Image (cartoon, grey):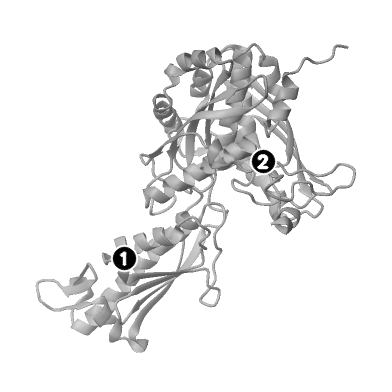
Amino acid sequence: RGEEFLSSAHGRDVVSQAELALDADGRILALRLHSQANVGAYATPTGVAIQLLIGPWVQTSVYHITPIDFHFQAVLTNTAPTGAYRGAGRPEAIYLMERLIDEAARQTGIDRVLLRRRNFIVPEQMPYTNAMGQQYDSGRFEHVLDQALPLADWHGFEARAAASRARGLWRGLGLATFLEWTGGNAFEERVTVTVGADGVVEVFSAVNAMGQGIATSLAQLVVDAFGIPIEQVRVVLGDTDRGDGFGSAGSRSLFTGGSAVRIGAERTIERGRELAAQALEASVHDVLYAAGRYQVAGTDLSLDLAELAARQPGRQILVDSTSAVAGPSWPNGCHVCEVELDPETGTVQVVRYASVNDVGRVVNPLIVRGQLEGGALQGLGQALSESIAYDPASGQLLSGSLMDYALPRALNAPPLRMTMDESTPCLNNPLGVKGVGELGTIGATPCVVNAVADALARAGRADLAPRLDMPLTPGRLWQLLQPQPQG
């Protein structure tokens, strides 16, 4: 683990200055942004692209902002290189945007929910091309917000805040509405589907299992396509002896790899129909397929998958298939949380958390929920505790173990209320799915920090909100709350 901390890629080290221009009604007129990103001592293509390309692609997020003035710099330093870390550029961009929106609401006196509503991209604008040239295929951002507010009991907050004040704690309410781009900018994938003489359907895909449950999801897609029991399905992932492909990155495994499996399965069934027509001496148009069996319409002539495969050279039906989706997916969400801040110690506790996530069609709800919840907890960690530290004099890494690098623990996890909105499928792939592996991480960080800023504002310290820098550790917040020397 020490070697991992010392030498593997770090992430999120960005310093930004931003300005938002609004008219008298609170409609955004322009966004100006200057960012410097640490890419470490050795700039990797991924580390540079994340900060100079991928993050900016989503910088305007769910808001209609046309005039932009962006300046991004990649800076070489003496740290480990930076690279892809869950969210990869999107968390930095969305964090900045949501902090700006809340600060604009405070300075203009416009309700922060209303300010967001006035600037949302609306469904009638879809497909929508943002200022960076990225096209959103779909999205109903106000619809997601409308679900999240009652889920979080937004209007019941004041009573809870009063109860916190009675205990000497400052309570804050945070909100983040956002989207992300997924697909890894690699929209083609290859699969090989093999039907054996034992009736087992084996699918090889170049995507990889990394704990995200992709093997289960791909198996479900095969079951749905072939109409066979899951016991008859075998999924093989990432075996370079079997073939090549792009792999897993950018929340593309189901979005791109799953779409390829669906298309490959359909092509295999069609190939089987042709072979069955030859074996049964019938027109291919008369051969029907259902539940693992080919049958000539209007007759009792039929072959199951195993029988058909056994008749072929090599005793198998093999279809190698390459397919592509039409473009990225744009999952989005609205996250709401409440925090309690102890002004005596600077300690922050997230006490309530609710989110609605537009994830398109869902293949396995349990897996999706696990990714959303895990992502949110990871975002909480970034907001409140996680930080790579170097000795400024020697350049030596100080946070080289989990004793020094403060990951969130079960004790820090609030009750999570999460809803998956399937009402807006992605139009760029045949499954209608959207990548979800990074969504929770992207929404959680600005949501938590906005809640802390709200707690400060309600306690009469709104001036401190622009000075909040992650992670909001007790020491940092306590120092921020102390009287500043005059002069």
Look at 18% across and 72% down and name the residue there. 286
The amino acid type found where label 1 is placed reads Ile
- Residue 394, x across and y down, in percent: 89, 47
Considering the numbered disc 1 on the image, is that residue within a helix, a strand or a loop?
A: helix
Q: Is residue 356 above or below residue 342?
A: below
State the residue in front, 185 or 390: 390
Is residue 325 visible in this depiction of the protein?
no
Is residue 158 visible in this depiction of the protein?
yes
The amino acid type found where label 2 is placed reads Glu
Disc sitting over residue 386 in the figure: 2
- Residue 142, x across and y down, in percent: 44, 28
Considering the numbered disc 2 on the image, is that residue within a helix, a strand or a loop?
A: loop
Disc sitting over residue 230 in the figure: 1
- Residue 137, x across and y down, in percent: 46, 43
Look at 61% across and 24% down and name the residue there. 452
How far apart are the alpha carbons under marks 1 and 2? 41 Å
